[in-house]
Image: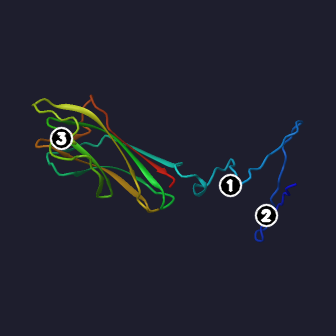
Amino acid sequence: MSKVAIKGATTGTGVFTLESPATNTDRTLVLPDEAGTIITTAGVPASAMPAGSVLQVVQITSTTTAATASPTMIATGIGATITPTSVSSKILVMIQTSLSGTTGIGISIARGETIIWNPMVSDENGFYGALYNDSVTRALSNMQYLDSPATTSATTYNLYFAARSVTGTINPNDSTTGGTCIILMEIAG
């Protein structure tokens, strides 16, 4: 027969009490045959969560308007910051933004000022809402990227954009489009 041992810590002066609930029913608590952490109402520490678990979520929304006619990526001034709990964590970056322009706009994701995801592959591809006439198009654009920042310092993810030959606008200031939403999810590594 297996034995159960309750071992007190060699330091500390507090008293740890095991208390049964008031019940008229016999109950059995079966312990797992493995080492680990018991989940309590206080929650599970991030360090005990299995790989792939969501550790925290940050969301920002913005209606800040930015415009450019440059084919080179520039900052929109829209970003969100998260402080990872572990250097092994990954950050899932999800961005939805509203765009307007006549010949297309491209967006990318930057960690700080360094672009880490840019789906534009040429002047003709990778631009969202591209039109080849004089009418203005408005569209919602979505982007996702899984980053490995390898830090526990506050990390900011910024939305960058570019336009092909004529002015493109992020969050155009009218009633037909929405704003920008950035969601950052820390995923246990």
Residue matched to label 1 = 37
Q: Are marks 1 and 2 in contact (CB under 8 Å)?
A: no
Residue that label 3 marks: 168
**Secondary structure under the numbered disc 2 in the rendered image:** loop
Residue name at image x 28 percent, y 48 percent: 108
Separation (CA) of disc 3 from disc 2 = 64 Å
Tell me how far mark 3 sits from mark 1, CA to CA: 52 Å
Q: Which mark is residue 14?
A: 2
Report the front residue among 117 and 175: 117
In this rendering, the answer to whether 45 lies above or below 98 is below
Q: Quadrant of residue 95?
A: top left
Q: Position of residue 70 (x, y in %)?
A: 14, 48
| Rendered location of residue 64, percent (x, y) | 29, 43
Q: Amino acid at mark 1?
A: Thr
Q: Position of residue 9 (x, y in %)?
A: 77, 67
Image quarter in which the N terminus is found: bottom right
Q: Which dot marks residue 159?
A: none
Q: Quadrant of residue 2?
A: bottom right
Q: Which comes before the other along the chain, label 1 or label 2?
A: 2
- In front of the other: 63 or 71: 71
Name the amino acid type tagged 3.
Gly
| Residue situated furthest bottom in the rendering | 10
> Residue most toward the front?
1
Q: CA distance from mark 1 to mark 2?
A: 20 Å
6, above or below 174, in the image: below
Please say if the residues under marks 3 and 1 sit with CB atoms less than 8 Å apart: no
> Element type at marker 3?
strand
The percent coordinates of residue 30 (x first, y second) are: 79, 46
Q: Which amino acid, by three-letter code, is at mark 2? A: Gly
Give the residue drawn at x 21%, y 47%. Answer: 121
Q: Residue at x 21, y 51 (%)?
A: 73
Q: Residues within 10 Å of mark 2 (few under 14, many from 20)?
A: few
